[in-house]
Amino acid sequence: MKHYLSVNDIDSLPDWVEEAINLKKDPYQFEDLGKRKTLCLLFFNNSLRTRLSTQKAAMNLGMEVMVMNFGNEGWALEYGDGTIMDQGTSEHIKEAAQVVSQYCDIVALRAFAGLVDKAKDEAEEVINGFAKYASIPVVNMESSVGHPLQALADAITMAENKKKARPKVVLSWAPHPKALPHAVANSFVQMMKLQDAEFVITHPKGYELNPEITEGCQIEHDQQKALENADFVYVKNWSNYADYGKVVNKDLNWTMTEEKLGKAKFMHCLPVRRNIVVEDAVLDGTQSLVAEQAKNRIFSAQIVLKKILEQNK
Amino acid sequence: MKHYLSVNDIDSLPDWVEEAINLKKDPYQFEDLGKRKTLCLLFFNNSLRTRLSTQKAAMNLGMEVMVMNFGNEGWALEYGDGTIMDQGTSEHIKEAAQVVSQYCDIVALRAFAGLVDKAKDEAEEVINGFAKYASIPVVNMESSVGHPLQALADAITMAENKKKARPKVVLSWAPHPKALPHAVANSFVQMMKLQDAEFVITHPKGYELNPEITEGCQIEHDQQKALENADFVYVKNWSNYADYGKVVNKDLNWTMTEEKLGKAKFMHCLPVRRNIVVEDAVLDGTQSLVAEQAKNRIFSAQIVLKKILEQNK
Amino acid sequence: MKHYLSVNDIDSLPDWVEEAINLKKDPYQFEDLGKRKTLCLLFFNNSLRTRLSTQKAAMNLGMEVMVMNFGNEGWALEYGDGTIMDQGTSEHIKEAAQVVSQYCDIVALRAFAGLVDKAKDEAEEVINGFAKYASIPVVNMESSVGHPLQALADAITMAENKKKARPKVVLSWAPHPKALPHAVANSFVQMMKLQDAEFVITHPKGYELNPEITEGCQIEHDQQKALENADFVYVKNWSNYADYGKVVNKDLNWTMTEEKLGKAKFMHCLPVRRNIVVEDAVLDGTQSLVAEQAKNRIFSAQIVLKKILEQNK
């Protein structure tokens, strides 16, 4: 692994999860590993959990952290090859990536999908541009198509809470007033493929995710049927993929309720719209794992940083 | 004290002031206390002094600091119970407070009064929401109704500069072109009640602060009379409280002048509008304590953080 | 040197360059020097390189760093003497500078030229105001008329790459769609005067820089002639100085090309507009020093901070 761009950069998910759970018991056991090493966090979009948890992870490893909001603190970037830069962009990603590489040892990036142009989003100009032109390792803090630090935190959370070797895990679409990216759902699906579980995706007809990502997954359009005997229910909205970036369904029958959840554990990456995505009773109940998922964001980031630091020693 | 939400969370003001003055002599004497502890500063509004002094205080104690501007870097928060979140807010304070609690050991917050809806401002949704839902101590870096780090810095400054055991202290209203919150004045009044002094509040008729806060205080509408033989004159504008948040008086006769000040020391929390709130001659003269007050913001924050760290050891 | 406001604050450029090159070999050799010292970076304008490289420099010296964006995080500042502050500005630079001086040991500032009012830009209210009223050393991270950390990094880069004792160095104007400040060009010219070289400035007629700065420099309006046998070609756009802040020429014949460059090394401070200022082939070629210049921003900042820390020990 040079970069951590997607969950497919994980060589063995069970090993990483075990190592992360071990890290969590004593987060400072490797605090010399990051000495004199600097992590730069570059945000092209808003962040709460990712901003704080990734900083905390780096500090636990003894790293220095520099945080920068690219939108309002830096320059508009150009991604095209051979562009005559006489318009709005001030700096080419080639220079930006090279320059950042001079000042830190690892760079982590957040750049959301625009949800307007599918081809452009899937090209992932920002993260792929940095991976191509930076001379240092790049970590994905949510790109157009993936959020692999979240998926790794989810895997850790399920490992800590599972009662059987092969749990039933359901990814259940939920309504939402705004158009949201597919990144969290994509990475969750990719991560589920890396471990042994009974995995079912449920969503309204027409809300299929990218078929290349869900290839081989069980898809069940009847939510009730999908949820039967579930051990973990991961609820998440995403906007339409076929009619790209559109909100074509806001059906509140898909909202997660205490009744539908049954005895399963409830998971969500946050932020979450209460009483739209999930009713209060679930979030405020004892089956909700959302705070544990948030906490595990520290350890998913820390294991990724640790592995990068170790291989570059 | 679990949280530091108002000056009323101080168990003994004289003891805290003495301890802060001792800290100031050797600010690094407790630099191991904050080792591996993280302070998160969350700003819903602008800040210069508070941002820098609170960071400095935490660093003096060996803490790590994470700073975040909630407005443009995070998500719009929802405060209502049972809300169906299909409008502009993306995250409920319950989740935000729980999540922040996973990543740090103390959270400090700034969220100003909106000055439109008195009941809403006095409910103090942000700071009270965090105090209710966070599992870690919360520090007030200026809320709708109080600015207790400023008031504690003011108490330290007066202790350092007083020439008699029971000085005369005057809180004198000043004109200002914009509507300002009552937070600084409120906390100053509450703090004055915690110590022995001759305390007088002076302001134009109709500019009464919240009577629950000023209960038992001497109020004198004749500024000249109020200022007689004063040792400390604390000048501050606030907008109207009865006609909530309105500027109904801009009378420059209330501006503080060298002549009115007499031999008293001049105090103001800053930022200050020159030649509106106070004339240049006062600010540039030798009786002004504003720089000392600003310096003592470090030690008021440091004593609060120290006490919280000690009780959670 | 109390402050580092311009390259003229350098007592001996060759000595500083040598010391910086030595620092670069072992950046942590003085990491105790900055212990318990805090650097505050105040940005009135955007920054990528300066933000990250100056933080890195401070960390290499063991300093703590506090970063603040004055525009959206602080208060609008007033600079006038005796102003009645009843308009948009909330805080006078006297107070702001005094206050910042309480919280840190060195303050570094960025405040670009507005390019509307020449006299106002040349008065350099922000940096000169801080230099006047702050009680701590002030470092220029690009002011209206100078960018001395960049020029020092450029001097280091030339020293590392020169093949003869007295190289030929050409500062060549380039076209640009937007009006840019003169700061980088000014400091480069001033820096070139501090060392032995054959130095030529080339630009279209009418694009003269401030004649007080270029006094004694060779100016050649024929770019081809200027570039003959050059060892280093520093390319940079600036807006018109006589017709202040205007873009009166966008002639792409001034764009730097591989052919024009010949065997010279190419330099630019970045960010750079590709195929307007310089063609891709130059930036992507082996004669480009732009990444090395960016890297040397760490060591120009570090040598400045080191010298300030040493004299204040």
Image (cartoon, coloured by chain):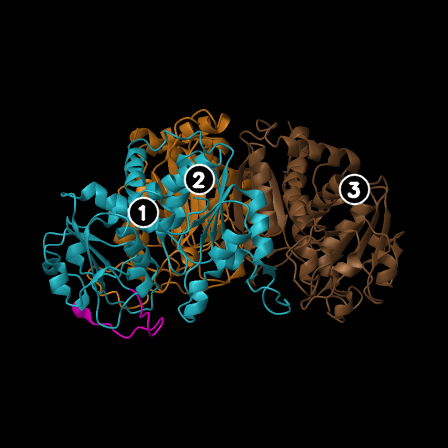
Chain colours: A brown, B cyan, C orange
Q: Which residue is mark 2?
A: B308
Neighbour tally class for label 2: few under 14, some 14-19, many 20 plus, Cα within 10 Å: many
Do labels 3 and 1 touch, CB within 8 Å?
Answer: no
Task: Tell me the magenta residue range.
Answer: B238-253
The CA distance from mark 2 to mark 1 is 15 Å
Query: Where residue B88 sits in the image (x, y, percent)?
Result: 59, 68
The CA distance from mark 3 to mark 1 is 50 Å
Work out whether residue B297 or residue B163 is closer to the camera in this orientation and state it.
B163
Confirm whether the magenta stretch covers residue B250.
Answer: yes
Mark 3 chain: A
Going from N to C along the chain, the mark reached first, 2 or 1, is 1
Q: Which mark is residue B152?
A: 1
The residue located at (17%, 44%) in the rendering is B162
Q: Which residue is mark 3?
A: A162
Is residue A191 among what the camera can see?
yes
Share a chain, discs 2 and 3? no
Q: Is residue C273 left or right of residue B12?
A: right
Share a chain, discs 2 and 1? yes
Name the element at disc 3: loop
Query: Where residue A220 sits in the image (x, y, percent)?
Result: 88, 60
- What residue type is disc 3 on? Lys
- What residue type is disc 2 on? Ile
